[in-house]
Image (spheres, grey):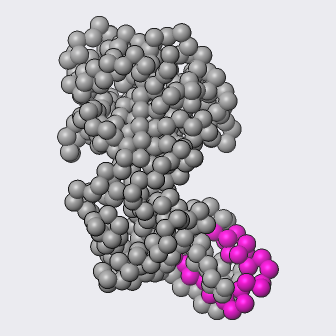
Amino acid sequence: MAIKVCKFGGTSMADANVIASVKKIIVSDRERRVVVVSAPGKRYSGDKKITDLLYACFNELKSTGGIQKSFAPVRARFTGIVKQLDLKLDIGAVLDATEKRIIEEGSIDFTASRGEYLSAVIMAEALGAKFVDAENVVFFDGHGQLDGDKTYKAVSSAVAGTKRAVLPGFYGVDVHGKVKTFSRGGSDISGAIAARAVNANVYENWTDVSGFLACDPRIVDNPEQIKSLSYKELRELSYMGADVLHSESIFPVRKANIPILIKNTFRPGDEGTTIVPTSRFIQSGNVVTGIAGKKNFTVIYVEKSLMNSEIGFMRKVLSVIEDEGIPLEHIPSGIDTMSLVIPGDALDKERLTRITDGIKKAVEPDVLRVIEKVALIATVGHGMSSSVGTSARLFKAMAEAGINVKMIDQGTSELNVVVGVKDDDYESCIKAIYKEFFKK
Ligand code: ASP
Protein backbone atom coordinates (compact mmCIF):
# COMPACT_ATOMS: atom_id res chain seq x y z
CA MET A 1 0.00 0.00 0.00
CA ALA A 2 1.18 3.49 -0.73
CA ILE A 3 2.26 5.50 2.30
CA LYS A 4 1.61 9.16 2.96
CA VAL A 5 3.64 10.86 5.67
CA CYS A 6 1.71 13.75 7.17
CA LYS A 7 3.22 16.36 9.43
CA PHE A 8 1.05 18.66 11.53
CA GLY A 9 2.51 21.98 12.64
CA GLY A 10 2.05 23.90 15.88
CA THR A 11 -1.23 25.60 15.01
CA SER A 12 -2.66 22.20 13.97
CA MET A 13 -1.86 20.92 17.48
CA ALA A 14 -2.79 24.06 19.40
CA ASP A 15 -5.86 22.81 21.27
CA ALA A 16 -8.18 19.83 21.65
CA ASN A 17 -10.64 21.03 18.99
CA VAL A 18 -7.99 21.33 16.30
CA ILE A 19 -6.45 18.02 17.34
CA ALA A 20 -9.87 16.43 16.89
CA SER A 21 -10.07 17.79 13.31
CA VAL A 22 -6.53 16.60 12.66
CA LYS A 23 -7.57 13.13 13.77
CA LYS A 24 -10.45 13.22 11.28
CA ILE A 25 -8.08 14.21 8.49
CA ILE A 26 -5.71 11.37 9.33
CA VAL A 27 -8.27 8.59 9.63
CA SER A 28 -10.09 9.69 6.47
CA ASP A 29 -7.20 8.21 4.44
CA ARG A 30 -5.73 4.77 5.20
CA GLU A 31 -2.56 5.72 3.39
CA ARG A 32 -1.81 8.39 6.02
CA ARG A 33 0.20 5.89 7.99
CA VAL A 34 3.02 7.96 9.40
CA VAL A 35 2.19 11.09 11.39
CA VAL A 36 4.76 13.64 12.58
CA VAL A 37 3.73 16.35 15.03
CA SER A 38 5.01 19.65 16.36
CA ALA A 39 4.45 21.02 19.83
CA PRO A 40 1.20 22.94 20.36
CA GLY A 41 1.52 26.45 18.93
CA LYS A 42 -0.41 29.65 19.58
CA ARG A 43 -4.20 29.42 19.99
CA TYR A 44 -4.67 33.14 19.45
CA SER A 45 -2.40 36.08 18.80
CA GLY A 46 -0.57 36.93 21.99
CA ASP A 47 -0.69 33.29 23.17
CA LYS A 48 2.56 31.45 23.94
CA LYS A 49 3.89 28.47 21.97
CA ILE A 50 4.69 25.43 24.11
CA THR A 51 8.26 25.43 22.80
CA ASP A 52 8.73 29.00 24.02
CA LEU A 53 7.30 28.05 27.43
CA LEU A 54 9.83 25.22 27.55
CA TYR A 55 12.72 27.54 26.78
CA ALA A 56 11.48 29.60 29.74
CA CYS A 57 11.59 26.41 31.86
CA PHE A 58 15.22 25.98 30.96
CA ASN A 59 15.99 29.56 32.02
CA GLU A 60 14.32 28.91 35.37
CA LEU A 61 16.24 25.66 35.72
CA LYS A 62 19.52 27.47 35.17
CA SER A 63 18.82 30.16 37.68
CA THR A 64 17.02 28.21 40.40
CA GLY A 65 17.73 24.52 39.80
CA GLY A 66 14.00 23.81 39.40
CA ILE A 67 11.19 24.44 36.88
CA GLN A 68 8.21 24.57 39.16
CA LYS A 69 6.93 27.97 38.10
CA SER A 70 7.50 27.77 34.34
CA PHE A 71 6.38 24.18 33.93
CA ALA A 72 2.92 24.97 35.38
CA PRO A 73 1.48 26.47 32.16
CA VAL A 74 2.94 23.57 30.11
CA ARG A 75 1.30 21.11 32.48
CA ALA A 76 -2.00 22.97 32.32
CA ARG A 77 -2.05 23.03 28.48
CA PHE A 78 -1.41 19.31 28.06
CA THR A 79 -3.69 18.28 30.92
CA GLY A 80 -6.51 20.36 29.39
CA ILE A 81 -6.00 18.83 25.94
CA VAL A 82 -6.09 15.24 27.24
CA LYS A 83 -9.15 15.94 29.37
CA GLN A 84 -11.05 17.58 26.53
CA LEU A 85 -10.19 14.78 24.14
CA ASP A 86 -11.40 12.34 26.79
CA LEU A 87 -8.36 10.09 26.45
CA LYS A 88 -7.47 7.29 28.85
CA LEU A 89 -3.85 8.44 29.01
CA ASP A 90 -2.53 9.16 32.52
CA ILE A 91 -1.10 12.51 31.46
CA GLY A 92 -0.34 13.49 35.07
CA ALA A 93 2.15 10.64 35.34
CA VAL A 94 3.67 11.43 31.91
CA LEU A 95 4.10 15.08 32.91
CA ASP A 96 5.64 14.17 36.26
CA ALA A 97 8.17 11.94 34.54
CA THR A 98 8.87 14.64 31.96
CA GLU A 99 9.43 17.31 34.62
CA LYS A 100 11.79 15.02 36.50
CA ARG A 101 13.80 14.18 33.39
CA ILE A 102 14.07 17.83 32.32
CA ILE A 103 15.74 18.55 35.67
CA GLU A 104 17.99 15.48 35.47
CA GLU A 105 19.12 16.11 31.90
CA GLY A 106 19.66 19.84 32.46
CA SER A 107 19.95 20.46 28.74
CA ILE A 108 18.31 23.17 26.66
CA ASP A 109 17.69 20.85 23.70
CA PHE A 110 16.13 18.15 25.85
CA THR A 111 13.86 20.69 27.56
CA ALA A 112 12.74 22.25 24.26
CA SER A 113 12.06 18.84 22.69
CA ARG A 114 9.42 17.88 25.26
CA GLY A 115 6.65 19.79 23.47
CA GLU A 116 6.91 17.49 20.46
CA TYR A 117 7.34 14.45 22.70
CA LEU A 118 4.14 15.16 24.65
CA SER A 119 2.23 16.09 21.49
CA ALA A 120 3.16 12.78 19.88
CA VAL A 121 2.29 10.72 22.97
CA ILE A 122 -1.17 12.34 22.97
CA MET A 123 -1.70 11.99 19.22
CA ALA A 124 -0.68 8.32 19.30
CA GLU A 125 -3.20 7.70 22.06
CA ALA A 126 -5.93 9.60 20.20
CA LEU A 127 -5.33 7.57 17.04
CA GLY A 128 -4.65 4.22 18.70
CA ALA A 129 -1.33 4.33 16.82
CA LYS A 130 2.20 3.29 17.75
CA PHE A 131 4.32 5.99 19.42
CA VAL A 132 7.84 5.99 17.98
CA ASP A 133 10.18 8.16 20.03
CA ALA A 134 12.53 10.21 17.85
CA GLU A 135 15.11 9.58 20.56
CA ASN A 136 15.39 6.01 19.31
CA VAL A 137 15.30 6.58 15.56
CA VAL A 138 16.64 10.01 14.55
CA PHE A 139 20.43 10.28 14.79
CA PHE A 140 22.90 13.12 14.38
CA ASP A 141 26.55 12.46 13.51
CA GLY A 142 29.67 13.85 15.18
CA HIS A 143 29.37 17.10 13.16
CA GLY A 144 25.81 17.73 14.30
CA GLN A 145 24.43 16.74 10.88
CA LEU A 146 21.72 14.16 10.34
CA ASP A 147 23.09 10.62 10.09
CA GLY A 148 20.81 9.74 7.19
CA ASP A 149 21.66 6.07 6.66
CA LYS A 150 21.25 5.13 10.30
CA THR A 151 18.11 7.25 10.74
CA TYR A 152 16.26 6.06 7.62
CA LYS A 153 16.85 2.42 8.56
CA ALA A 154 15.72 2.92 12.15
CA VAL A 155 12.58 4.91 11.24
CA SER A 156 11.58 2.45 8.57
CA SER A 157 11.96 -0.58 10.83
CA ALA A 158 10.12 1.17 13.70
CA VAL A 159 7.04 1.80 11.55
CA ALA A 160 7.15 -1.45 9.56
CA GLY A 161 4.16 -3.65 10.20
CA THR A 162 2.18 -0.97 12.06
CA LYS A 163 -1.16 0.30 10.84
CA ARG A 164 -0.18 3.78 11.88
CA ALA A 165 2.71 5.37 13.76
CA VAL A 166 3.28 8.79 15.33
CA LEU A 167 6.72 10.37 15.55
CA PRO A 168 7.54 13.59 17.41
CA GLY A 169 9.25 16.18 15.21
CA PHE A 170 12.12 18.58 15.98
CA TYR A 171 14.61 16.26 17.73
CA GLY A 172 16.84 13.22 17.63
CA VAL A 173 19.97 12.16 19.52
CA ASP A 174 23.64 12.99 19.09
CA VAL A 175 26.53 10.54 19.07
CA HIS A 176 26.54 10.52 22.87
CA GLY A 177 22.87 9.57 23.01
CA LYS A 178 21.84 13.05 24.19
CA VAL A 179 18.71 14.67 22.77
CA LYS A 180 19.48 17.34 20.18
CA THR A 181 16.99 19.55 18.36
CA PHE A 182 16.99 20.90 14.83
CA SER A 183 16.73 24.68 14.45
CA ARG A 184 13.36 26.33 15.15
CA GLY A 185 10.56 25.04 12.95
CA GLY A 186 12.55 21.83 12.51
CA SER A 187 9.60 19.43 12.71
CA ASP A 188 9.27 20.08 8.97
CA ILE A 189 12.67 18.42 8.58
CA SER A 190 11.58 15.47 10.75
CA GLY A 191 8.53 14.99 8.50
CA ALA A 192 10.77 14.95 5.43
CA ILE A 193 13.10 12.44 7.12
CA ALA A 194 10.17 10.13 7.87
CA ALA A 195 8.94 10.45 4.27
CA ARG A 196 12.35 9.48 2.95
CA ALA A 197 12.69 6.62 5.44
CA VAL A 198 9.47 4.92 4.39
CA ASN A 199 9.78 5.97 0.76
CA ALA A 200 6.43 7.74 0.95
CA ASN A 201 4.57 8.58 -2.21
CA VAL A 202 3.92 12.05 -0.80
CA TYR A 203 4.99 14.18 2.16
CA GLU A 204 1.95 16.12 3.30
CA ASN A 205 2.78 19.17 5.40
CA TRP A 206 -0.35 20.41 7.16
CA THR A 207 -0.19 24.00 8.32
CA ASP A 208 -2.48 27.00 8.78
CA VAL A 209 -2.25 28.44 5.26
CA SER A 210 -3.38 26.97 1.95
CA GLY A 211 0.13 26.81 0.52
CA PHE A 212 2.65 29.27 -0.81
CA LEU A 213 1.62 32.67 -2.01
CA ALA A 214 3.46 34.51 -4.76
CA CYS A 215 4.61 37.05 -2.17
CA ASP A 216 4.10 38.15 1.42
CA PRO A 217 0.39 38.93 1.97
CA ARG A 218 1.37 41.55 4.57
CA ILE A 219 2.86 43.55 1.70
CA VAL A 220 0.53 42.80 -1.23
CA ASP A 221 -3.19 42.27 -0.65
CA ASN A 222 -4.40 38.87 -1.64
CA PRO A 223 -1.44 37.70 -3.73
CA GLU A 224 -1.82 34.79 -6.13
CA GLN A 225 -1.57 31.30 -4.74
CA ILE A 226 1.29 29.16 -6.11
CA LYS A 227 -0.14 25.82 -7.22
CA SER A 228 3.11 24.14 -8.08
CA LEU A 229 6.76 24.81 -7.24
CA SER A 230 9.99 22.95 -7.95
CA TYR A 231 12.33 21.92 -5.11
CA LYS A 232 14.83 24.48 -6.34
CA GLU A 233 12.31 27.31 -6.38
CA LEU A 234 11.15 26.32 -2.93
CA ARG A 235 14.68 26.40 -1.62
CA GLU A 236 15.26 29.89 -3.00
CA LEU A 237 11.95 31.24 -1.75
CA SER A 238 12.02 29.71 1.71
CA TYR A 239 15.65 30.62 2.23
CA MET A 240 14.78 34.19 1.35
CA GLY A 241 12.04 34.42 3.92
CA ALA A 242 8.89 32.68 2.60
CA ASP A 243 8.34 30.86 5.86
CA VAL A 244 5.68 28.24 5.13
CA LEU A 245 8.22 25.43 5.31
CA HIS A 246 11.65 25.12 6.96
CA SER A 247 14.20 25.81 4.23
CA GLU A 248 16.13 22.60 4.95
CA SER A 249 13.17 20.27 4.68
CA ILE A 250 13.67 19.48 1.02
CA PHE A 251 17.04 17.75 1.44
CA PRO A 252 15.78 14.36 2.68
CA VAL A 253 12.95 14.10 0.14
CA ARG A 254 14.76 15.56 -2.85
CA LYS A 255 17.06 12.59 -3.32
CA ALA A 256 14.10 10.20 -3.38
CA ASN A 257 11.97 12.46 -5.62
CA ILE A 258 9.13 12.55 -3.09
CA PRO A 259 6.72 15.43 -3.72
CA ILE A 260 5.69 17.70 -0.84
CA LEU A 261 2.09 18.85 -0.56
CA ILE A 262 1.33 21.86 1.62
CA LYS A 263 -2.20 21.66 3.01
CA ASN A 264 -4.32 23.78 5.33
CA THR A 265 -5.70 21.98 8.42
CA PHE A 266 -8.38 24.64 8.74
CA ARG A 267 -9.45 24.39 5.06
CA PRO A 268 -8.68 20.79 4.12
CA GLY A 269 -10.66 21.11 0.89
CA ASP A 270 -8.25 23.71 -0.52
CA GLU A 271 -5.92 22.42 -3.19
CA GLY A 272 -2.67 23.59 -1.50
CA THR A 273 0.76 23.85 -3.11
CA THR A 274 2.62 20.87 -4.56
CA ILE A 275 6.40 20.91 -4.56
CA VAL A 276 7.84 18.57 -7.16
CA PRO A 277 11.28 17.47 -8.32
CA THR A 278 12.74 20.03 -10.67
CA SER A 279 12.77 17.50 -13.51
CA ARG A 280 9.02 16.97 -13.20
CA PHE A 281 8.20 20.63 -12.91
CA ILE A 282 5.72 21.88 -15.46
CA GLN A 283 5.83 25.59 -16.08
CA SER A 284 2.60 27.45 -15.42
CA GLY A 285 1.76 30.53 -17.45
CA ASN A 286 3.84 32.76 -15.16
CA VAL A 287 7.44 33.67 -15.90
CA VAL A 288 7.96 34.38 -12.21
CA THR A 289 6.83 31.86 -9.61
CA GLY A 290 7.29 33.93 -6.47
CA ILE A 291 9.01 36.86 -4.79
CA ALA A 292 10.56 36.78 -1.31
CA GLY A 293 13.05 38.81 0.63
CA LYS A 294 14.73 39.76 3.86
CA LYS A 295 15.85 43.02 5.40
CA ASN A 296 18.89 44.10 7.38
CA PHE A 297 21.93 42.96 5.44
CA THR A 298 25.30 44.69 5.58
CA VAL A 299 27.28 45.07 2.37
CA ILE A 300 31.06 45.52 2.50
CA TYR A 301 32.14 46.96 -0.83
CA VAL A 302 35.79 46.43 -1.80
CA GLU A 303 37.41 48.11 -4.82
CA LYS A 304 40.94 47.75 -6.11
CA SER A 305 42.31 48.38 -9.59
CA LEU A 306 43.49 45.21 -11.31
CA MET A 307 41.94 43.11 -8.54
CA ASN A 308 41.27 40.41 -11.12
CA SER A 309 44.95 39.94 -11.91
CA GLU A 310 46.03 39.74 -8.28
CA ILE A 311 46.22 36.03 -7.58
CA GLY A 312 44.48 35.01 -4.37
CA PHE A 313 42.73 38.37 -3.85
CA MET A 314 39.30 36.87 -3.22
CA ARG A 315 40.64 34.13 -1.03
CA LYS A 316 42.41 36.66 1.20
CA VAL A 317 39.23 38.69 1.60
CA LEU A 318 37.11 35.61 2.25
CA SER A 319 39.55 34.28 4.85
CA VAL A 320 38.90 37.38 6.95
CA ILE A 321 35.18 36.54 6.94
CA GLU A 322 35.87 32.87 7.60
CA ASP A 323 38.11 33.66 10.56
CA GLU A 324 35.20 35.54 12.12
CA GLY A 325 32.97 32.50 11.56
CA ILE A 326 30.14 34.49 10.06
CA PRO A 327 27.83 33.52 7.18
CA LEU A 328 28.25 35.14 3.79
CA GLU A 329 25.10 35.34 1.68
CA HIS A 330 26.24 36.70 -1.68
CA ILE A 331 29.42 37.91 -3.33
CA PRO A 332 28.49 39.99 -6.38
CA SER A 333 31.69 41.00 -8.16
CA GLY A 334 33.01 43.05 -11.05
CA ILE A 335 36.51 43.31 -12.60
CA ASP A 336 37.82 45.63 -9.95
CA THR A 337 35.13 45.31 -7.31
CA MET A 338 33.57 42.79 -5.00
CA SER A 339 30.84 43.09 -2.40
CA LEU A 340 30.35 40.90 0.62
CA VAL A 341 26.76 40.59 1.71
CA ILE A 342 26.39 39.58 5.36
CA PRO A 343 23.26 39.27 7.53
CA GLY A 344 23.22 42.38 9.75
CA ASP A 345 22.38 40.41 12.88
CA ALA A 346 25.64 38.45 12.54
CA LEU A 347 27.64 41.66 13.01
CA ASP A 348 28.16 43.99 15.92
CA LYS A 349 30.27 47.16 15.76
CA GLU A 350 33.47 45.52 16.99
CA ARG A 351 33.16 42.60 14.65
CA LEU A 352 32.56 44.86 11.69
CA THR A 353 35.62 46.93 12.58
CA ARG A 354 37.71 43.77 12.93
CA ILE A 355 36.54 42.66 9.49
CA THR A 356 37.16 45.96 7.74
CA ASP A 357 40.60 46.29 9.40
CA GLY A 358 41.35 42.69 8.44
CA ILE A 359 40.45 43.29 4.78
CA LYS A 360 42.49 46.50 4.65
CA LYS A 361 45.49 44.67 6.01
CA ALA A 362 45.05 41.62 3.78
CA VAL A 363 44.56 43.29 0.38
CA GLU A 364 45.05 47.07 0.75
CA PRO A 365 41.95 48.06 -1.24
CA ASP A 366 41.60 51.44 -3.02
CA VAL A 367 38.10 51.82 -1.61
CA LEU A 368 36.35 50.02 1.21
CA ARG A 369 32.80 51.04 2.06
CA VAL A 370 30.22 49.63 4.43
CA ILE A 371 26.55 49.94 3.51
CA GLU A 372 24.13 48.95 6.25
CA LYS A 373 20.39 48.25 6.25
CA VAL A 374 20.18 46.68 2.82
CA ALA A 375 17.21 44.45 1.93
CA LEU A 376 17.61 41.57 -0.49
CA ILE A 377 14.69 40.60 -2.70
CA ALA A 378 14.70 37.42 -4.77
CA THR A 379 12.48 37.08 -7.80
CA VAL A 380 12.31 33.36 -8.49
CA GLY A 381 11.06 31.21 -11.35
CA HIS A 382 12.26 28.60 -13.81
CA GLY A 383 10.41 30.53 -16.49
CA MET A 384 12.89 33.38 -16.17
CA SER A 385 15.72 31.64 -18.02
CA SER A 386 13.70 30.89 -21.12
CA SER A 387 11.96 34.21 -21.36
CA VAL A 388 13.84 37.10 -22.94
CA GLY A 389 13.65 40.47 -21.23
CA THR A 390 12.66 39.34 -17.74
CA SER A 391 15.44 41.29 -16.01
CA ALA A 392 14.63 44.34 -18.12
CA ARG A 393 11.02 44.17 -16.92
CA LEU A 394 12.17 43.78 -13.32
CA PHE A 395 14.47 46.79 -13.37
CA LYS A 396 12.02 48.91 -15.32
CA ALA A 397 9.35 48.19 -12.70
CA MET A 398 11.77 49.20 -9.97
CA ALA A 399 12.83 52.34 -11.81
CA GLU A 400 9.22 53.38 -12.36
CA ALA A 401 8.61 52.99 -8.63
CA GLY A 402 11.63 55.25 -7.98
CA ILE A 403 13.67 52.53 -6.30
CA ASN A 404 17.43 52.66 -6.43
CA VAL A 405 19.18 49.31 -7.01
CA LYS A 406 22.16 48.94 -4.68
CA MET A 407 23.24 45.47 -5.78
CA ILE A 408 22.34 42.81 -8.34
CA ASP A 409 23.11 39.13 -8.21
CA GLN A 410 21.87 36.73 -10.82
CA GLY A 411 22.95 33.21 -10.04
CA THR A 412 24.21 31.12 -12.95
CA SER A 413 21.17 28.87 -12.59
CA GLU A 414 19.07 31.75 -13.97
CA LEU A 415 16.42 30.64 -11.55
CA ASN A 416 16.44 33.91 -9.67
CA VAL A 417 17.52 37.50 -9.69
CA VAL A 418 18.44 38.98 -6.32
CA VAL A 419 18.39 42.75 -5.94
CA GLY A 420 19.63 44.74 -2.98
CA VAL A 421 17.72 47.91 -2.07
CA LYS A 422 17.51 50.19 0.98
CA ASP A 423 15.54 48.57 3.82
CA ASP A 424 13.08 51.47 3.53
CA ASP A 425 12.36 50.55 -0.11
CA TYR A 426 11.71 46.87 0.66
CA GLU A 427 7.92 46.91 0.67
CA SER A 428 7.51 49.19 -2.33
CA CYS A 429 10.01 47.14 -4.30
CA ILE A 430 8.10 43.90 -3.71
CA LYS A 431 4.86 45.65 -4.65
CA ALA A 432 6.38 46.94 -7.88
CA ILE A 433 7.80 43.55 -8.91
CA TYR A 434 4.56 41.78 -8.07
CA LYS A 435 2.55 44.29 -10.11
CA GLU A 436 4.83 43.83 -13.10
CA PHE A 437 4.74 40.03 -13.19
CA PHE A 438 1.38 39.08 -11.74
CA LYS A 439 -1.20 41.85 -12.05
CA LYS A 440 -1.50 42.07 -15.81
N1 ASP B 1 8.23 23.42 18.19
C1 ASP B 1 9.43 23.80 17.49
C2 ASP B 1 9.42 25.30 17.29
O1 ASP B 1 8.55 26.00 17.79
C3 ASP B 1 9.63 23.05 16.23
C4 ASP B 1 8.50 23.11 15.23
O2 ASP B 1 7.43 23.63 15.53
O3 ASP B 1 8.70 22.65 14.10
O4 ASP B 1 10.29 25.79 16.65
Total numbered circles? 0
Which residue, as the protein is rendered here, is positioned at the far right? 311
Is 271 positioned to the left or the right of 361 in the image? left
Percent position (x, y) of residue 366?
Answer: 64, 92
The quadrant holding residue 207 is top left
Residue 148 percent coordinates (x, y): 64, 33
Q: Nearer the viewer, residue 274 or 175?
A: 274
Which residue is outermost to the top?
Answer: 88
For the C terminus, the quadrant is: bottom left
Give the residue drawn at x 58%, y 75%.
332
Q: Quadrant of residue 17?
A: top left
Is residue 369 visible in the rendered structure shown here?
A: yes
Q: How far from the left and from the top, in percent, is residue 87?
A: 27, 11
Is 408 placed above or below 48 here? below
Compared with 33, 247 (above or below) is below
Nearer-the-camera pick, 296 or 337: 337
Residue, x 57% and y 26% (percent of image)? 199
What segment is highlighted magenta in the picture?
299-321
In the depicted view, which residue is nearer to us: 55 or 237?
Answer: 237
| Residue 383 vertical position relative to residue 107 in the rendered view, above or below | below
Q: Is residue 305 magenta?
A: yes
